[in-house]
Amino acid sequence: MPVNLLDFDLEGLAALCAGLGEKRFRAVQLYRWIHQKGASDFAHMSDLAKGLRGKLAAVAEIRGLPLISEHVSADGTIKWLFDVGGGNAVESVYIPEDDRGTLCLSSQAGCAVGCRFCSTGHQGFSRNLSTGEIVGQLWFAEHRLRQRLALPAGERAIDNVVMMGMGEPLQNYDALVPALRTMLSDHGYGLSRRRVTVSTSGLTRMIDRLRNDCPVALAVSLHAPNDKLRDALVPLNRKHGIDELLDACVRYLDAAPRDFITFEYCMLDGVNDTPELAQELVRLVRGRVPCKFNLIPFNPFPASGLKRSSRERVLAFARVLQDAGIVTTIRKTRGDDIDAACGQLAGEVQDRTNARERLALRRAVIPIAATTGGLL
Ligand code: SAH
Ligand code: SF4
């Protein structure tokens, strides 16, 4: 099978070209054709010598992901479902805003972390996506949108990427980092480090590695101010508790392109949304981690057994944080009419982990904490 050039960052492509006896600047030209012009056919790459085009066609291809469906929401949000083979499909979501376009990408088919409130987690895990499958989502969306929006040459559609779709990006680290490099490269998508965000449920060792290898903006899915509650919501907390996580966040800030960490907090009715828990959160982070909070109203999905906190509860929770001087925003729910909102992405996953059974078991054995109102 020919190699897929979407799998390579610029250094990888330069090494491939060197193997074909070609100079580095040829790799730069090729990379620009692929990512900046959206080319998939070597024959169209007019400034590459015919000989090189022939050599490339013999060993390589530019293979995007087969599109299964495209849904456009009433608010302009677009959700694409891509076939990644083996009965698996993943989703990407484009969220237009007044001043920018954000693309939310998937990193895995399913997710092995199994958070209590997440539809991807409920589906279990099938496999990691390759670099080409991560970049392929951006490659498709950027060039599809340029056409759809009839953008003038040189203007880009997507200026913000968030790794907040299906999967835990830091559990697919080796594929993630080259994908991030292509997003950041001036010859690739030219995105600013501040506008590429990796969201993680808290793999502390991997946060340290990202800090060294490719520091981009970091969002950490916190969801609870203490280990007891977080253990029940985000299972990997039992291995890497909140203390360890906050220490990793502080270390990350040394290299981060922003001087704060974004904490995501999914607002679950009667579970983690009381003013007392907001106060506990203030005591936890104040003076320790420069941060902002992004409160995400829970997006329900069948089988979750959980409810979204009321608007009043979310506002009251935000007020406690804000009164303590912590910048707090409430995420607008976008695209929920097409199941494209946070945590609703489920694609199609051939579960290899028996997630449903494990979750059912966990629900049965977790002692019900007073703070959870008996919902977990
Ligand atoms: N695995 C990574 C990134 C993907 S999830 C992580 O957990 O951070 C992206 C965000 O969506 C996370 O903050 C996650 O907690 C949130 N989320 C998951 N399920 C949700 C739901 N049903 N409603 C609202 N937000 C949800
Ligand atoms: Fe995985 Fe993130 Fe969903 Fe948790 S919230 S199950 S880490 S995708």
Image: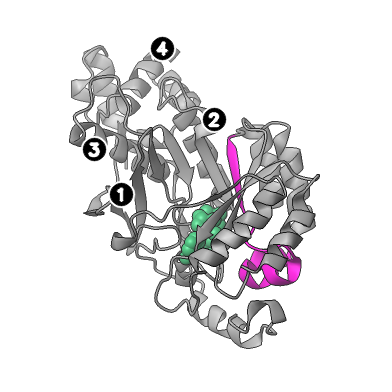
Query: Label 2 vs label 3: CA separation?
Result: 23 Å
Query: Label 3 vs label 4: CA separation?
Result: 27 Å
- Helix, strand or loop at label 2? It is helix
In magenta segment, residue 225: yes
Counting residues from the N terminus, which is met first, the one under dot 1 or under dot 3? 1
In the image, residue 2 lies at what x, y percent?
A: 32, 38
Counting residues from the N terminus, which is met first, the one under dot 1 or under dot 4? 4
- Rendering quarter of residue 36: top left
Query: Label 4 vs label 2: CA separation?
Result: 24 Å
307 relative position to 2: left or right: right
Which segment is the magenta one? 216-239
The residue positioned 28% from the left and 17% from the top of the image is: 52
Amino acid beneath label 4: Phe
- Helix, strand or loop at label 3? It is helix
Q: Residues within 10 Å of mark 3 (few under 14, many from 20)?
A: some
Question: What residue is pinned by disc 1?
Answer: 77
The residue positioned 21% from the left and 33% from the top of the image is: 149
In the image, residue 199 lies at what x, y percent?
A: 56, 48
Report the number of discs.
Answer: 4
Q: Nearer the viewer, mark 1 or mark 3?
A: 1
Which of the two residues, 375 or 241, is positioned nearer the viewer here?
375
Dot label at residue 25: 4
Amino acid beneath label 2: Arg
Determine whether 103 is above or below 37 in the image. below
Residue at the bottom extreme, as displayed: 364
Question: What residue is pinned by disc 3?
Answer: 144
Question: What residue is pinned by disc 2?
Answer: 193
In the image, residue 45 lies at what x, y percent?
A: 23, 19
- Helix, strand or loop at label 1? It is loop
